[in-house]
Image (spheres, rainbow, N blue to C red):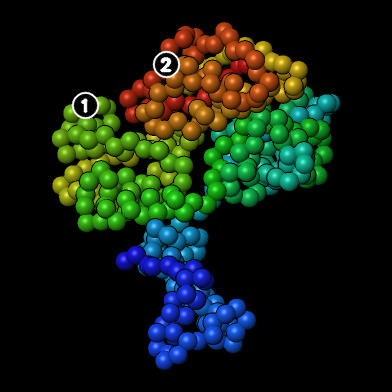
């Protein structure tokens, strides 16, 4: 139903015509007259009521709702907004005189130079310096530095900082002098936007009571933000033909999704899979992209700063490639120029030693190996 909207003048004119039509003699409706004032007062009230009606209509339809109204609409269907995700990455703690042992406990805080974004050291059992018994990372005498995992204290895309942004040690850390992030932090997402919420809700409704690839995809996409996936039908994990079996390859941007995430995907797919079918959930086969290039810069900013911006732009782009996506060789040139207006030329570009697009293997995803910008 289309609501017929009226402005203040139209309302007053309509009221005046109705009043004059019901009167037996000519009425005084000039500006300043008592009757004109009454009609204008009524028109003001009508405008307010009209605005309230518009607000109600907007908040009762998902297509025109925003914020909490979207959330309440989806909640009636058991559908919730995906929360924000904190960025993760690595920093390197260093010291000038490594004469004695040092210790970096889990929970140590670091921040960017402005101290507006904080990050915390987290446990990494795969790190040779990590000690579960001590609850941190041990640096023996003679060891000048240690690279550890960190996570942003606040969830959101703001935590996806560029290389070299983190330089402040916020916690007391005897024996450690400096901290820096050599690579950009990635994986941070703001809470799901209203546009994404509406789009995903449409897919959710379209997938109900169905066992199609759309239903499986909607189940995977509803777990968390930043996931990419590919559904491969009638094959097994070895790539061989197996009718009735499908493989879900999923990645969270890291190339190595944690076991807990794969378990959540397994449960979500199990709830919507076709009866009589079997399936497997797996992480992707990672192909490392080793990128090198030379750049020329103007006098706008320092050459080293431009190098950091270009490297960060390339790393962020590659980290965002979805499962099965190809890395275009010519895209690297575009990214370098887009990173900074001071970049005047890009040359000697190699992608895994060549000058061709890089395609991932079967069940594969491309992630950053090395980025060398000079």
Q: Residues within 10 Å of mark 2 (few under 14, many from 20)?
A: some
Residue 111 location, x and y as percent?
A: 73, 42
Where residue 240 is drawn, which disc sits there? 1
Q: Please report the residue visible at 65 percent of the width from the left and 15 percent of the height from the top.
A: 344
Q: Please report the residue visible at 44 percent of the width from the left and 76 percent of the height from the top.
A: 14
Residue 16 location, x and y as percent?
A: 47, 80
Q: On the picture, is 358 further left or further right than 313? A: left
Picture quarter containing residue 283? top left
Q: Please report the residue visible at 29 percent of the width from the left and 37 percent of the height from the top.
A: 231
Q: How crowded is mark 1: few (under 14 residues within 10 Å), some or many (20 or more)?
A: few
Q: Please report the residue visible at 74 percent of the width from the left and 21 percent of the height from the top.
A: 300
Q: What element carries label 1?
A: loop
Identify which residue, 341 or 5, lies in the foreground.
Answer: 5
What residue did someone put label 2 on? 357
Pick out the residue farthest to the front: 25
Q: Is residue 114 visible?
A: yes
């Amino acid at each position: 139903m289309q609501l017929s909207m009226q402005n203040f003048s139209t309302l007053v004119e309509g009221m005046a015509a109705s009043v004059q039509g019901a009167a037996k003699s000519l009425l005084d409706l000039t500006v300043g007259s008592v009757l004109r004032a009454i009609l204008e007062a009524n028109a003001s009230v009508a405008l307010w009521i009209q605005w309230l009606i518009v607000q109600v209509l907007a908040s009762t339809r998902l297509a025109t709702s925003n914020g909490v109204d979207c959330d309440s609409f989806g909640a009636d269907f058991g559908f919730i907004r995906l929360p924000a995700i904190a960025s993760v990455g690595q920093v390197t703690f260093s010291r000038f005189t490594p004469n004695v042992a040092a210790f970096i406990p889990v929970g140590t805080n670091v921040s960017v130079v402005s101290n507006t974004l904080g990050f915390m050291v987290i446990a990494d059992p795969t790190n040779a310096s990590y000690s579960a018994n001590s609850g941190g990372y041990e640096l023996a005498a003679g060891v000048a530095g240690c690279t550890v995992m960190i996570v942003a204290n606040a969830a959101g895309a703001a935590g996806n900082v560029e290389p070299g942004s983190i330089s402040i040690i916020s916690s007391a850390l005897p024996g450690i002098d400096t901290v820096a992030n050599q690579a950009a932090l990635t994986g941070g997402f703001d809470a799901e936007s209203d546009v994404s919420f509406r789009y995903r809700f449409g897919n959710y409704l379209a997938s109900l009571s169905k066992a199609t690839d759309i239903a499986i995809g909607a189940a995977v996409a509803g777990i968390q933000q930043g996931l990419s996936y590919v559904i491969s039908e009638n094959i097994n994990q070895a790539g061989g033909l197996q009718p009735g079996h499908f493989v879900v390859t999923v990645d969270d941007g890291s190339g190595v999704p944690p076991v807990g995430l794969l378990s959540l995907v397994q449960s979500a797919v199990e709830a919507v899979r076709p009866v009589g079918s079997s399936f497997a959930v797996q992480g992707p086969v990672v192909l490392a992209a080793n990128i090198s290039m030379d750049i020329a810069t103007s006098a706008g900013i320092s050459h080293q700063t431009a190098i950091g911006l270009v490297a960060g732009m390339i790393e962020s782009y590659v980290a965002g490639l979805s499962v099965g996506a190809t890395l275009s060789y010519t895209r690297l040139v575009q990214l370098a120029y887009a990173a900074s207006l001071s970049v005047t030329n890009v040359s000697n570009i190699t992608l895994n030693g060549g000058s061709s697009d890089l395609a991932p293997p079967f069940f594969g995803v491309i992630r950053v190996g090395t980025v060398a910008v000079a």
